[in-house]
Amino acid sequence: MKYSGWPDPGELVVGKIDEIEDFGVFVDLEEYQDKRGLIHISEVASGWIKNVRDHVREGQIVVCKVLDVDESHEQIDLSLKDVNDHQRSDKIQDWKNEQKADNWMDLALEEDSDDEAYTAIANELIGVHGSLYDGFKQAAIHGAEALEDTDLSDDEIDALVETARENVSVPYVNVTGYVDLENASPSGVDGIREALEAAEGNGEVPDEVELEVVYVGAPEYRIKVRAPNYKTAESQLEESASRAVAAIQEQGGDGEYHRERKTDDE
């Protein structure tokens, strides 16, 4: 996705070197539609420059700092020397992430969206989360909840969440579910305790997974799972609930798993 409009002075932009002249370098801005900037020879590198081509080449991807923007003359002045290695690395990674997210948008919308609809949906993600990539990342971690502040339709949210969870790699995800445990049999509280121990895995939960079961209000217990990815988290959540329900039923009690909380807020 390329932005319309103009970059702001001080902004870091990604560009591809299109043309090299003795006085400077012309750069096509990769993030802005139909925008081109100029790096004057004095802004290519520190110190005296004998030959600009000793420092840059056509087709090279560069990160530049925007020095000045003159919209009336369609001129954007850029600096290459004012960008340090850390800024360059971070900006390139952000740009690559946005390219990934652009592809994810195509997957989510398939052939059902024209450019206008695509832009409208993208702007909703950017408006809430700051970028397409962060929008998909939050959707992968938190599901539809991450998009509830947008004006997207339920179908659009479902498509975005499904695509995010199939494609986005995140450091970890948290998922939560609930299990109701009731035991009117003679085992009573001891039976509930055994069901909770079963829910916690009896020490057999994978090392990379954190699983916690807490009481939230009779007869409801919250199961919270932290895992490296959504698939693992969901699997561990469902297995935890299944163990608890099976254990309480063995005691003569009743159990039920559900994703949304039933009791009043704490």
Image (spheres, helix red, strand yellow):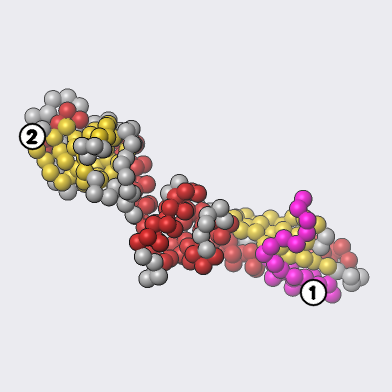
Q: Which residue is tagged 2?
A: 22
Callout 1: SS: helix
Q: Residue at x 44, y 58 (%)?
A: 121
Q: Which residue is mark 1?
A: 249
Residue sitting farthest toward the right:
186
Q: Whole-percent x and y of residue 142?
A: 56, 56
Q: Amino acid at mark 2?
A: Asp
For label 1, count other residues whose C-alpha is less than 10 Å away and answer few (under 14), some (14-19) or many (20+): some
In the displayed structure, 13 sits above or below 203; it is above
Q: In front here: 133 or 209?
A: 133
Tell me the SS state at disc 2: loop
Kind of residue at disc 1: Gln
N-term-proximal mark, 2 vs 1: 2
- Magenta stretch encompasses residue 126: no
Q: Residues within 10 Å of mark 2 (few under 14, many from 20)?
A: few
Which mark is in front, 2 or 1? 2
- The boundaries of the magenta stretch are 240-266
Instruction: Name the residue located 46 percent from the left edge and 64 percent from the top edge.
Output: 163
Q: Say left or right for 183 vs 85.
A: right
Residue 82: x and y in percent read 27, 30
How many marks do you count on the picture? 2
| Most foreground residue, 266 or 48 | 266
Percent position of residue 220, x then y: 78, 61
Res. 109 visible in picture: yes
Measure the C-alpha gap from mark 2 to mark 1: 82 Å
State left or right for residue 94 relative to residue 181: left
- Can residue 229 be seen here? The reply is no
Task: Name the quarter where the N terminus is drawn.
Answer: bottom left
